[in-house]
Protein backbone atom coordinates (compact mmCIF):
# COMPACT_ATOMS: atom_id res chain seq x y z
CA UNK A 1 0.00 0.00 0.00
CA UNK A 2 1.44 3.35 -1.04
CA UNK A 3 2.12 5.86 1.72
CA UNK A 4 2.28 9.57 0.94
CA UNK A 5 4.15 12.34 2.70
CA UNK A 6 5.42 15.85 2.13
CA UNK A 7 9.17 16.17 1.64
CA UNK A 8 11.19 19.39 1.68
CA UNK A 9 13.70 19.76 -1.18
CA UNK A 10 15.31 22.74 -2.92
CA UNK A 11 13.26 25.30 -1.03
CA UNK A 12 9.90 23.75 -1.94
CA UNK A 13 7.65 21.00 -0.60
CA UNK A 14 6.90 17.96 -2.75
CA UNK A 15 4.18 15.38 -2.21
CA UNK A 16 5.69 11.90 -2.63
CA UNK A 17 3.90 8.55 -2.62
CA UNK A 18 6.06 5.49 -1.94
CA UNK A 19 5.09 1.83 -1.69
CA UNK A 20 8.15 1.57 0.55
CA UNK A 21 9.46 -1.97 0.03
CA UNK A 22 13.16 -1.44 0.74
CA UNK A 23 14.16 -4.84 -0.68
CA UNK A 24 12.55 -4.35 -4.11
CA UNK A 25 13.97 -2.61 -7.20
CA UNK A 26 12.72 0.94 -7.71
CA UNK A 27 10.44 2.56 -10.27
CA UNK A 28 10.47 6.36 -10.11
CA UNK A 29 7.35 7.73 -11.84
CA UNK A 30 7.46 11.21 -13.41
CA UNK A 31 4.01 12.42 -14.41
CA UNK A 32 2.44 14.53 -17.15
CA UNK A 33 1.61 18.16 -16.71
CA UNK A 34 -2.13 18.54 -15.86
CA UNK A 35 -2.11 15.14 -14.17
CA UNK A 36 -0.10 13.98 -11.11
CA UNK A 37 1.36 10.84 -9.59
CA UNK A 38 -2.07 9.21 -9.37
CA UNK A 39 -1.95 8.68 -13.14
CA UNK A 40 0.27 5.69 -12.29
CA UNK A 41 -2.21 4.01 -9.92
CA UNK A 42 -2.65 1.04 -12.25
CA UNK A 43 1.11 0.68 -12.64
CA UNK A 44 1.42 0.47 -8.85
CA UNK A 45 -1.06 -2.42 -8.91
CA UNK A 46 0.71 -4.15 -11.82
CA UNK A 47 4.09 -3.81 -10.10
CA UNK A 48 2.90 -4.99 -6.67
CA UNK A 49 5.32 -7.43 -5.06
CA UNK A 50 7.94 -6.89 -7.76
CA UNK A 51 8.89 -3.20 -7.54
CA UNK A 52 8.94 -0.35 -5.06
CA UNK A 53 7.13 2.54 -6.77
CA UNK A 54 7.99 6.15 -5.88
CA UNK A 55 5.67 8.86 -7.25
CA UNK A 56 6.48 12.53 -6.60
CA UNK A 57 4.27 15.39 -7.77
CA UNK A 58 6.38 18.06 -9.48
CA UNK A 59 6.64 21.48 -7.83
CA UNK A 60 3.57 23.61 -8.49
CA UNK A 61 1.49 20.55 -9.42
CA UNK A 62 -0.66 17.92 -7.74
CA UNK A 63 -0.37 18.10 -3.96
CA UNK A 64 3.08 19.72 -4.04
CA UNK A 65 3.49 23.34 -3.03
CA UNK A 66 2.08 26.06 -5.27
CA UNK A 67 4.79 28.28 -6.75
CA UNK A 68 4.06 32.01 -7.14
CA UNK A 69 6.59 32.52 -9.95
CA UNK A 70 6.48 33.23 -13.67
CA UNK A 71 7.78 29.86 -14.82
CA UNK A 72 8.89 26.49 -13.44
CA UNK A 73 11.47 25.11 -15.84
CA UNK A 74 12.33 21.54 -16.74
CA UNK A 75 15.80 22.10 -15.26
CA UNK A 76 14.26 23.16 -11.93
CA UNK A 77 12.16 20.00 -11.90
CA UNK A 78 15.26 17.92 -12.68
CA UNK A 79 17.06 19.67 -9.81
CA UNK A 80 14.17 18.74 -7.50
CA UNK A 81 14.22 15.10 -8.59
CA UNK A 82 17.99 14.86 -8.12
CA UNK A 83 17.66 16.31 -4.59
CA UNK A 84 14.75 13.97 -3.81
CA UNK A 85 16.73 10.93 -4.96
CA UNK A 86 19.61 11.92 -2.70
CA UNK A 87 17.30 12.61 0.24
CA UNK A 88 15.62 9.19 -0.14
CA UNK A 89 18.89 7.37 -0.84
CA UNK A 90 17.65 5.81 -4.09
CA UNK A 91 19.89 3.99 -6.57
CA UNK A 92 19.67 1.59 -9.54
CA UNK A 93 16.48 3.42 -10.49
CA UNK A 94 14.05 2.49 -13.25
CA UNK A 95 12.24 5.61 -14.49
CA UNK A 96 8.70 5.69 -15.89
CA UNK A 97 8.21 9.12 -17.48
CA UNK A 98 5.09 10.45 -19.17
CA UNK A 99 5.05 13.61 -21.32
CA UNK A 100 6.84 16.39 -19.35
CA UNK A 101 8.23 13.62 -17.16
CA UNK A 102 10.39 12.67 -20.13
CA UNK A 103 11.67 16.22 -20.50
CA UNK A 104 12.75 16.06 -16.86
CA UNK A 105 14.10 12.52 -17.10
CA UNK A 106 16.48 13.22 -19.98
CA UNK A 107 17.99 16.17 -18.11
CA UNK A 108 18.27 14.20 -14.88
CA UNK A 109 19.75 11.02 -16.34
CA UNK A 110 22.27 12.89 -18.50
CA UNK A 111 23.64 14.46 -15.29
CA UNK A 112 23.67 11.38 -13.03
CA UNK A 113 23.53 8.31 -15.24
CA UNK A 114 25.20 6.15 -12.58
CA UNK A 115 22.00 6.32 -10.50
CA UNK A 116 19.77 4.81 -13.18
CA UNK A 117 19.11 1.34 -14.57
CA UNK A 118 16.53 1.93 -17.33
CA UNK A 119 14.02 4.46 -18.69
CA UNK A 120 10.59 4.32 -20.28
CA UNK A 121 9.20 7.47 -21.91
CA UNK A 122 5.55 7.49 -23.01
CA UNK A 123 3.86 10.33 -24.87
CA UNK A 124 7.07 12.30 -24.66
CA UNK A 125 9.86 13.81 -26.75
CA UNK A 126 13.16 15.65 -26.39
CA UNK A 127 12.58 18.65 -28.66
CA UNK A 128 11.19 22.10 -27.97
CA UNK A 129 7.89 23.27 -29.41
CA UNK A 130 8.02 24.28 -33.09
CA UNK A 131 7.06 27.89 -33.74
CA UNK A 132 3.48 27.33 -34.92
CA UNK A 133 2.51 24.91 -32.16
CA UNK A 134 4.48 26.98 -29.64
CA UNK A 135 2.43 30.09 -30.43
CA UNK A 136 -0.84 28.15 -30.02
CA UNK A 137 0.28 26.63 -26.73
CA UNK A 138 1.64 29.95 -25.41
CA UNK A 139 -1.84 31.46 -25.75
CA UNK A 140 -3.33 28.37 -24.09
CA UNK A 141 -1.03 28.98 -21.10
CA UNK A 142 -2.16 32.62 -20.85
CA UNK A 143 -5.84 31.71 -21.14
CA UNK A 144 -5.61 28.92 -18.54
CA UNK A 145 -3.79 31.25 -16.15
CA UNK A 146 -6.45 33.92 -16.57
CA UNK A 147 -9.62 31.85 -16.71
CA UNK A 148 -8.85 28.38 -15.39
CA UNK A 149 -9.71 25.11 -17.11
CA UNK A 150 -13.19 25.72 -18.44
CA UNK A 151 -14.96 25.91 -21.80
CA UNK A 152 -12.65 25.77 -24.80
CA UNK A 153 -9.56 25.76 -22.54
CA UNK A 154 -10.76 22.50 -21.00
CA UNK A 155 -11.64 21.06 -24.42
CA UNK A 156 -8.19 21.99 -25.75
CA UNK A 157 -6.56 20.26 -22.80
CA UNK A 158 -8.57 17.10 -23.37
CA UNK A 159 -7.63 17.09 -27.08
CA UNK A 160 -3.99 17.37 -26.06
CA UNK A 161 -4.05 14.70 -23.38
CA UNK A 162 -6.16 11.98 -25.05
CA UNK A 163 -6.41 10.70 -28.60
CA UNK A 164 -9.48 11.24 -30.75
CA UNK A 165 -10.30 7.52 -30.79
CA UNK A 166 -10.04 7.28 -27.02
CA UNK A 167 -12.29 10.32 -26.51
CA UNK A 168 -14.94 8.75 -28.76
CA UNK A 169 -14.71 5.20 -27.37
CA UNK A 170 -17.74 4.32 -25.17
CA UNK A 171 -15.62 1.75 -23.31
CA UNK A 172 -13.21 4.46 -22.21
CA UNK A 173 -15.70 7.14 -21.17
CA UNK A 174 -15.34 6.48 -17.44
CA UNK A 175 -11.60 7.11 -17.62
CA UNK A 176 -11.99 10.16 -19.89
CA UNK A 177 -14.72 11.63 -17.67
CA UNK A 178 -12.65 11.08 -14.54
CA UNK A 179 -9.70 13.02 -15.94
CA UNK A 180 -11.96 15.70 -17.44
CA UNK A 181 -13.29 16.39 -13.95
CA UNK A 182 -9.80 16.36 -12.47
CA UNK A 183 -8.46 18.76 -15.13
CA UNK A 184 -11.50 21.04 -14.80
CA UNK A 185 -10.66 21.40 -11.10
CA UNK A 186 -7.04 22.45 -11.70
CA UNK A 187 -6.16 25.87 -10.27
CA UNK A 188 -5.11 28.88 -12.34
CA UNK A 189 -1.89 28.63 -10.32
CA UNK A 190 -0.82 25.72 -12.55
CA UNK A 191 0.26 28.35 -15.10
CA UNK A 192 4.00 28.49 -14.11
CA UNK A 193 4.35 24.71 -14.47
CA UNK A 194 2.38 24.72 -17.71
CA UNK A 195 4.53 27.56 -19.07
CA UNK A 196 7.67 25.60 -18.24
CA UNK A 197 6.53 22.71 -20.42
CA UNK A 198 5.38 24.86 -23.34
CA UNK A 199 8.55 26.99 -23.32
CA UNK A 200 10.98 24.13 -22.66
CA UNK A 201 14.35 24.03 -24.38
CA UNK A 202 15.39 21.06 -26.50
CA UNK A 203 17.24 18.19 -24.85
CA UNK A 204 17.94 16.32 -28.10
CA UNK A 205 21.64 17.07 -27.70
CA UNK A 206 21.65 15.09 -24.42
CA UNK A 207 20.29 11.88 -25.91
CA UNK A 208 23.51 10.40 -27.38
CA UNK A 209 25.08 10.49 -23.91
CA UNK A 210 22.32 8.31 -22.39
CA UNK A 211 23.41 4.68 -22.65
CA UNK A 212 20.98 2.92 -20.31
CA UNK A 213 18.19 0.95 -22.04
CA UNK A 214 15.29 3.18 -23.09
CA UNK A 215 11.80 2.08 -24.18
CA UNK A 216 9.82 4.69 -26.12
CA UNK A 217 6.02 4.32 -26.23
CA UNK A 218 4.21 6.56 -28.69
CA UNK A 219 0.58 6.75 -29.79
CA UNK A 220 -0.19 7.39 -33.46
CA UNK A 221 -2.79 9.99 -32.40
CA UNK A 222 -0.46 11.89 -30.04
CA UNK A 223 -1.20 15.49 -31.06
CA UNK A 224 1.32 17.43 -28.91
CA UNK A 225 4.18 14.89 -29.29
CA UNK A 226 3.62 13.32 -32.74
CA UNK A 227 5.23 10.12 -34.05
CA UNK A 228 8.04 11.91 -35.91
CA UNK A 229 9.31 13.25 -32.57
CA UNK A 230 9.54 9.71 -31.19
CA UNK A 231 11.42 8.65 -34.31
CA UNK A 232 13.90 11.44 -33.57
CA UNK A 233 14.38 10.17 -30.02
CA UNK A 234 14.91 6.64 -31.28
CA UNK A 235 17.55 7.84 -33.76
CA UNK A 236 19.49 9.72 -31.07
CA UNK A 237 19.30 7.28 -28.16
CA UNK A 238 22.02 4.62 -28.60
CA UNK A 239 20.22 1.86 -26.65
CA UNK A 240 16.52 2.28 -27.40
CA UNK A 241 13.39 0.52 -28.61
CA UNK A 242 10.19 2.12 -29.95
CA UNK A 243 6.64 0.81 -29.59
CA UNK A 244 3.98 2.67 -31.59
CA UNK A 245 0.33 2.18 -30.69
CA UNK A 246 -2.54 2.51 -33.15
CA UNK A 247 -5.57 4.64 -32.23
CA UNK A 248 -3.86 5.90 -29.05
CA UNK A 249 -2.99 9.50 -28.18
CA UNK A 250 -0.76 11.34 -25.71
CA UNK A 251 -1.44 9.25 -22.56
CA UNK A 252 -0.72 5.59 -23.41
CA UNK A 253 -0.64 4.36 -19.81
CA UNK A 254 -4.20 5.64 -19.32
CA UNK A 255 -5.60 5.05 -22.80
CA UNK A 256 -4.30 1.49 -23.30
CA UNK A 257 -3.26 0.04 -19.92
CA UNK A 258 -3.96 -3.52 -21.05
CA UNK A 259 -1.30 -3.12 -23.75
CA UNK A 260 1.13 -0.81 -22.01
CA UNK A 261 1.41 -2.01 -18.41
CA UNK A 262 2.72 -5.51 -19.28
CA UNK A 263 5.30 -3.87 -21.56
CA UNK A 264 6.39 -1.54 -18.77
CA UNK A 265 6.72 -4.20 -16.10
CA UNK A 266 8.40 -6.62 -18.50
CA UNK A 267 10.94 -4.03 -19.60
CA UNK A 268 11.82 -3.08 -16.05
CA UNK A 269 12.27 -6.75 -15.10
CA UNK A 270 14.71 -7.28 -17.98
CA UNK A 271 15.52 -4.01 -19.80
CA UNK A 272 16.69 -5.24 -23.19
CA UNK A 273 16.28 -3.38 -26.48
Image (cartoon, rainbow, N blue to C red):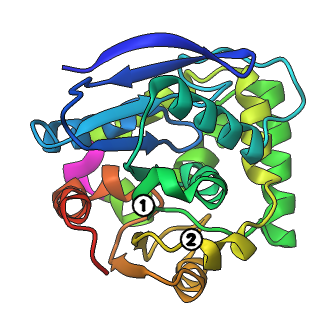
Dominant secondary structure of the residues highlighted in magenta in the image: helix
Q: Residue at x 69, y 70 (%)?
A: 206
Report helix, strand or loop for mark 2: loop
How crowded pointer 1 is (Cα within 10 Å; few <14, some 14-19, many 20+) is rated as many
Mark 2 surroundings: few (<14), some (14-19) or many (≥20) residues within 10 A:
many
Q: Position of residue 18 (x, y in %)?
A: 33, 24
| Mark pair 1, 2: CA separation | 10 Å
Residue for badge 1? 119
Q: Is residue 174 above or below residue 158?
A: above
Placement of the C terminus among the 4 image quadrants: bottom left
Question: Residue 272's x, y, as percent?
Answer: 27, 76
| Secondary-structure class at tag 1 | strand
Q: Label 2 belongs to which residue?
A: 210
Q: Which residues are magenta?
A: 169-173
Quarter of the rendering containing residue 122:
bottom left
Indicate left or right for 28 with 259 as reference.
right
Amino acid sequence: MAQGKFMRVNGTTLWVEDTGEQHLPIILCLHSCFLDGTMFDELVQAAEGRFRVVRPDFRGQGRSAIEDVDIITMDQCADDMEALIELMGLSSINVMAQSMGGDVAFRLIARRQELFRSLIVAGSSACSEPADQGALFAQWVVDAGNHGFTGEILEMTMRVMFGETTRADPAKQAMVSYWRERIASLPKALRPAMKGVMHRESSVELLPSIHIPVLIINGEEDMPRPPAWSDQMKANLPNSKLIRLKKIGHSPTLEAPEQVLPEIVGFFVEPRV
